[in-house]
Image: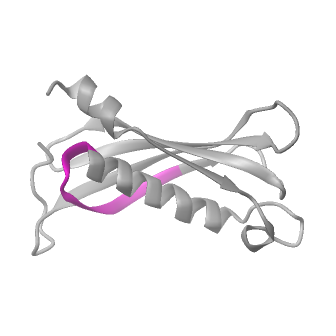
Amino acid sequence: MILEERIAKSRTTLFKAVFAELTNHHNMMLGGKAMEIMDEIAFITATRFCRKGFVTAGSIVDYKKPIPAETLIEVVGEVVNVGTTSLKVSVKIFVEEMYKDSRLECVDAEFTLVAIDQNKKPIKVL
């Protein structure tokens, strides 16, 4: 399978409603909750890409806009770079109002994940 096909097949999306358990006292989604969801999507994307075990080695997150309560989010993960033992996954969060036709990118992140074996030692991604 060529790399572009593998990337396309591993693209991962999640839709979620932003309710009170995800928000702070300003009725905005907690940054830590967003990070938790993004890290999970990055892990799933990497795993689907090559069906190996992964750990997160780092992340860069740009919170562009707050995510209000009572909205819908779409979280999208896609492999953007493949190294020898690691890969990078782009994760974006888009917000949609529940009862209006709107869509806005709110968070843009990049996660670096390392492929590991049963002994937690780095192994080749491909």
Quadrant showing the C terminus: top left
Q: Quadrant of residue 116?
A: bottom left
> Would residue 54 appear left or right of 108 to someone viewing this image?
left
Tell me the residue at 13%/61% (across/down). 122
Residue 99 in the image, given as x and y percentages of width and height:
88, 41
| Location of residue 34 (image quadrant) | bottom right
In the rendered structure, which segment of residues is drawn in magenta? 49-60
How far across and down, in percent of the image, does residue 76 sit?
52, 41
Q: Is residue 67 visible?
A: no
Q: Nearer the viewer, residue 41 or 86?
A: 41
Q: Is residue 17 left or right of residue 54?
A: right
**Main SS class of the magenta portion in the image:** strand
Q: Is residue 17 above or below residue 88?
A: below
Q: In this picture, is 3 found above or below 69?
A: above
Q: Nearer the viewer, residue 52 or 30?
A: 52
Instruction: Examine the structure image and report whether residue 89 is included in the region drawn in magenta.
Output: no
Residue 107: image x %, image y %? Answer: 64, 45
